Image: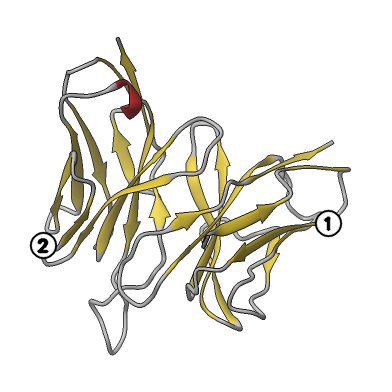
Amino acid sequence: QQPVQSPQAVILREGEDAVINCSSSKALYSVHWYRQKHGEAPVFLMILLKGGEQKGHEKISASFNEKKQQSSLYLTASQLSYSGTYFCGTEPPRDGPIYGGATNKLIFGTGTLLAVQP
Amino acid sequence: DGGITQSPKYLFRKEGQNVTLSCEQNLNHDAMYWYRQDPGQGLRLIYYSQIVNDFQKGDIAEGYSVSREKKESFPLTVTSAQKNPTAFYLCASSIVPQGAEAFFGQGTRLTVV
């Protein structure tokens, strides 16, 4: 089941901040964030792992609440280049003898369209 | 340069024909994925594979088939059983076993007429 993203779309002026939320109905091992510009491939921004480890972009931050199965992406002082569609990707933990480890089954949300205007 | 290549970029097929989309990676990644992208529906997982000769169904596998005979290749066949095959298809790869960045190809836009 796809994670739910909110808002569906947001319009900003350059320099303004934005928060994009991602919520899953299932337990999570990791949350990924990607940005896709029209007609292009999605590009990696950030990954947050269960247990608090975070890997990703210098100018963009994110949080991961494991108990609530939610993640938020924070875009501060937005630039024109931030425009695009943002996707969160969720990875459930593995079942079975090594429960809690990664599965590599990466499920993406429906996306949030961000438009930054001059 | 390492990367993931999808071909062709645009593909047209007549209704009722099977069509195979190519995905090749030279990143030495074990995991590979196929996603379908439709307006307003995000990226939906069709199939994924964590290792050669093994793959699992995603959320929308009906009407699609895959093979993973080589580590670098993960072709997707859209069969005539897929009721609405016109879409943008994206292939991706990543390392295993822990959660890791996925690298995407440039996509194939399939139009069935």
Q: In which quarter of the image is residue B71?
A: bottom right
Q: Which of B68 and A14 is in front in this view?
A: A14
Disc 1 and disc 2: Cα gap in Å? 45 Å
In the image, B2 versus B44, the foreground residue is: B2
Residue A3 screen position, x and y as percent = 34, 48
**Left or right of residue B90, residue A42 in this image:** left
- Whether residue A1 is visible to the viewer of this picture, yes or no, is no
Q: Is mark 2 on a helix, strand or loop?
A: loop
Q: Of the residues shown, which amino acid type is indicated by label 2?
A: Gly
Which residue was labeled with disc 2? A52
- Residue closer to the observer: B45 or B96: B96
Residue wearing tag 1: B18
Return the mark for residue A16: none
Does A70 appear above or below B76? above
Q: Which of B66 and B102 is in front in this view?
A: B102
Above or below residue A96? Residue A81 is above
Q: Which amino acid does label 1 sit on?
A: Asn
Q: Which chain carries label 2?
A: A
